[in-house]
Image (spheres, helix red, strand yellow):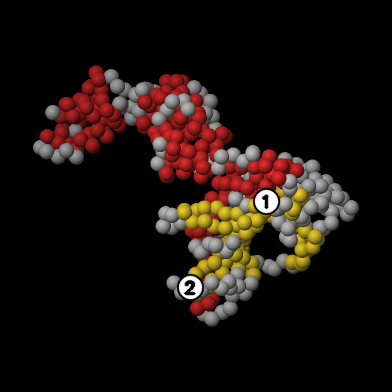
Amino acid sequence: MKYEAVIGLEIHVQLNAATKLFCDCPNRPGDAPNRNVCPVCLWLPGALPRLSQEALEKAVLGCLALNCTIQNESAFDQKVYYYPDLPKGYQLSQHHKPLARNGWVDIVGPDGGLKRLCIHHIHMEEDVAKLVHETEGRTPISLVDFNRAGTPLIEIVSEPDMHTPHDAMEYVKALRAQLRYTGSAECSLEQGTLRVDANISLRPVGTEVLNTKVEVKNMNSIHNVGDAIAYEIIRQTECLEKGEPIVLHTRLWDPERRVTAPMRAKFEGPCVPDPSVAPIVVTDVWLDAVRGRLPEMPARKSARFMETYGLEPDEAAAMSAERDLSEFFESVVERDLPPRKTAGWIASQLVPLLRERNRSVGQTHLTAERFAALLGALKKEIVNTQSAREILGQLLDSPDALEEIIQKGGHRQLSDTGDLETLVDRVLAAHPADVADYRSGNPKVLGFLMGQAMKASQGKANPKVLKALLAQRLG
Ligand SMILES: [Zn+2]
């Protein structure tokens, strides 16, 4: 490796405030086009913007969650550029006086240790309109949807602290987890409520220079962030080896072709102080009140889970990573269930099922009470592990009571020795060669026969009873 990559990320996060940043229009960009508009966000001449208090509070919560220092005074600038998605010719953004500075998040480095990645600053800005490109007959046309114009955003600008695609992916994950905890933002790359732009440059290993960077946009998943950066590092390495200079420009990640391609340059002008929105002056009293609304964050919660519930570090990290799941975990444990077993079931069974459904636990029919009842039925050996997994899926998807699901699905575990004896005898009679094999000293056959017996019970046999019976019958 002759070169080291230097990576900085600029991340736009859409705040989930009820209204837009400077008007009372609903903050719902996905509604039918141009439904949520008014003279302010249509940028009609003379309309005056008025800053949303809710958006400001949500922005501050996000900044605090990312360990930033809120500035006593911040202010909006007019960021001048000309493009049809911005008919007034400038975007209201904070350039000279951002809302917050000097934050950080910790990620797990490749060696397993913690690595601190720094945030340069966070500023507020309004989103611009959305262009929709279509054809009318054979004529290509572009339509403008103003629902998104004026949507409240924060832009989080990192220090160029990252050196690998892994660093960048972990940074996005850590930052997303922190922001989601605050409840200020949904942070979905797939839905565009979190957008990542990566600045990438190369330098000879061992030097500290910052060389010309290339900006890459349009990555709509964490994996795409990693892949786009990896591709760009290889592309720039090849340029340098051929003796071609790196030129400052913007490229778009193409997820189909899995390459970055140059993008048409936008005209960008200066940033000048905006006279229409008053500066934001933050008092200590107000800031303390907002700070008081910050929930217990994942790192502290994880430490508490280890201390209170005796979880291992990786279990505690998994149980505290998402706020709703961490609250679900605690609520189950409070119903007198063993914490480590509960954590194990949530991590290995529940989380994959939620992922398959692309839902959070709150969006399903599963409650802590229902989950606790299922684990209780498992403990009392009313159902076995295999059935419990199947039942869990049904508890997610239907409001039916646990008892009803067990009854209807015939999930009740077979523990009756008499019934199981008959079943074991039938299985042994059907596999005389394997029985002989076992008796001549091959213990591995027991596993096979156990599997056959379990299958014959349609997965419902109590494995402990079944195993004891098999061993007994085989002598
Ligand atoms: Zn409006």
Q: Where in the figure is residue 44, as x and y percent of width and height?
A: 86, 52
> Eyeballing the image, is 472 above or below 25?
above
The circle on residue 190 is none
State which quadrant residue 217 falls in: bottom right
Name the quadrant of the C terminus: top left
Give the side of residue 31 with respect to residue 404, left or right: right
Residue 193 seen from this side:
no
Q: Residue 7 vs residue 453: left or right?
A: right
Question: At which x and y percent is residue 51?
Answer: 78, 47
Q: Residue 103: image x %, image y %?
A: 60, 54
- Determine the image quadrant of residue 198: bottom right
Q: Which residue is mark 1?
A: 70
At 52% from the left and 53% from the top, the residue drawn is 106
Q: Mark 2 to mark 1: distance in Å?
A: 35 Å
Residue drawn at 57 percent across, 34 percent down: 363
Residue that mark 2 sits on: 206
Q: Which of 204/44 is in front?
A: 204
User: x and y percent of residue 113 in the render?
Assistant: 43, 54
Comes first in the chain, label 2 or label 1: 1
Is disc 1 surrounded by few (<14), some (14 to 19) or many (20+) residues within 10 Å?
A: many
- Dividing the image into 4 quarters, which one contains the N terminus? bottom left
Say what secondary structure mark 2 lies in: loop
| Dot in front, 2 or 1 | 1
Q: Report if residue 119 is visible in the image.
A: yes
Element carrying mark 1: strand
Amino acid, disc 2: Gly
Viewer-nearest residue: 376 or 73: 73
